[in-house]
């Protein structure tokens, strides 16, 4: 029950280890997020230099207000070396950043709490203190342009790793657990109450897609924009997170990684389900050039603009939500 124990701590979390200034919409009502995912740093590979250079290029080009890394940063031992190399590249730009875990990050020689503390040691980190938990889920506020109130919320969720049987046979991917959903529900209810009963426009970031990603992508009536070159790989068990935030009425878009050959966005029950673009070097299961996803939020609306940004600055798959998905 590690997430429930921390609900009060993280409900209003906006500061990381270096006492970052609060996130805030600009005077024109915009807030830009750059999503990087599946960087897969293997320190022994010469290609690692290129993927780290891509981080520099994308942050330099996009000049985001926040960088969100949706997991699978480390892909070899020592994991600490891989994480440091990623964080050094991100942190030096002076842009606030945060991360969630992928299914590979904890496979090596560091626990999630050790990795969490390591990441928090870098200037610019917006992740709150763990408060004794191994890998807390947390919420980040984006203040209104006048700085007087929360105007949007970002939920950063650990989608966990894999499931094994007693003989360590791999059974599939894990899911967002019931205590995590309870944590989200409690935090969401607090923000809604603080906003006079109206849910705040919210986004969720995690690594492994929900089962609804698969359902949406295989439904002919669903509007899909982007590249789909492999089947979606969610857990087989549906723990009900999608239903929970549909009931709460705040999260209107989810952003994930995990599937290296997908970067599409698809509308499902009026919620945008979107992949980031694989941000690392080519692997045995990647066939798309690396890049990132930019997300431009609009203050006071459940609306956003988004696109994939590639090395060299090419922009593809530009969408506006909800306009691009209205038949």
Image (cartoon, rainbow, N blue to C red):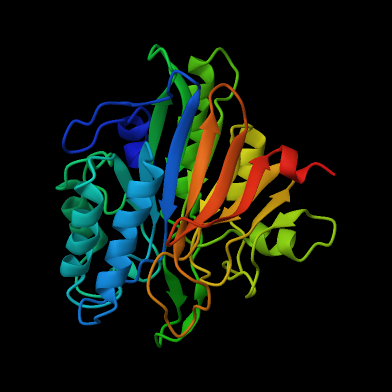
Work out whether residue 273 can be spotted.
yes
Q: Position of residue 162 (x, y in %)?
A: 44, 72
Q: Position of residue 120 (x, y in %)?
A: 19, 47
As drawn, is 97 to the left or to the right of 89? right
Q: Position of residue 63 (x, y in %)?
A: 36, 41
| Residue situated in front as seen by the camera: 181 or 119 | 119
In the image, residue 246 sits, relative to residue 151, either above or below, namely: below
In the image, residue 101 sits, relative to residue 8, either above or below, namely: below
Q: Residue at x 38, y 15 (%)?
A: 147
Residue 187, quarter of picture = top left
Q: Position of residue 132 (x, y in %)?
A: 21, 46
Work out whether residue 2 can be spotted.
no
Q: Residue at x 18, y 58 (%)?
A: 114
Count of labels in the image: 0
Quarter of the image for the C terminus: give it. top right
Residue 9, quarter of picture = top left
| Residue situated in front as seen by the camera: 164 or 62 | 62
């Amino acid at each position: 029950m590690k997430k429930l124990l921390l609900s009060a701590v993280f409900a209003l979390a906006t500061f990381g280890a270096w006492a970052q200034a609060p996130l805030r919409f600009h005077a024109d009502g915009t807030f830009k997020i750059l999503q990087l995912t599946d960087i897969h740093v293997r320190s022994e590979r010469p290609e690692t230099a290129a993927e780290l250079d891509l981080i520099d290029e994308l942050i330099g080009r996009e000049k985001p207000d926040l960088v969100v890394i949706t997991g699978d940063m480390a892909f070899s031992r020592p994991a600490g070396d891989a994480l440091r190399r990623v964080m050094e590249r991100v942190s030096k730009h002076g842009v606030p950043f945060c991360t969630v875990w992928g299914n590979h990050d904890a496979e090596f020689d560091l626990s999630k709490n050790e990795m969490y503390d390591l990441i928090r040691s870098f200037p610019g980190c917006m992740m709150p203190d763990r408060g004794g938990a191994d890998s807390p889920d947390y919420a980040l506020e984006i203040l209104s342009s006048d700085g007087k109130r929360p105007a949007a919320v970002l939920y950063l969720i650990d989608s966990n790793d894999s499931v094994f049987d007693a003989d360590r046979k791999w059974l599939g991917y894990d899911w967002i657990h019931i205590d995590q959903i309870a944590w989200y529900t409690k935090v969401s209810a607090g923000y809604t109450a603080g906003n006079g009963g109206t849910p705040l426009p919210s986004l969720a970031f995690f690594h492994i897609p929900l089962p609804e990603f698969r359902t949406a992508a295989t439904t002919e009536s669903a509007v899909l924009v982007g590249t789909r070159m492999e089947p979606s790989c969610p857990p087989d068990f549906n723990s009900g997170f999608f239903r929970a935030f549909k009931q709460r009425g705040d999260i209107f878009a989810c952003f994930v990684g995990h599937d290296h050959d997908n970067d599409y966005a698809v509308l499902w029950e009026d919620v945008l389900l979107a992949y980031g673009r694989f941000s690392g070097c080519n692997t045995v299961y990647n066939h798309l050039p690396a890049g990132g996803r930019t997300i431009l939020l609009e203050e006071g609306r459940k609306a956003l603009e988004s696109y994939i940004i590639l090395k060299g600055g090419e922009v593809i798959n530009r969408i506006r939500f909800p306009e691009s998905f209205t038949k």
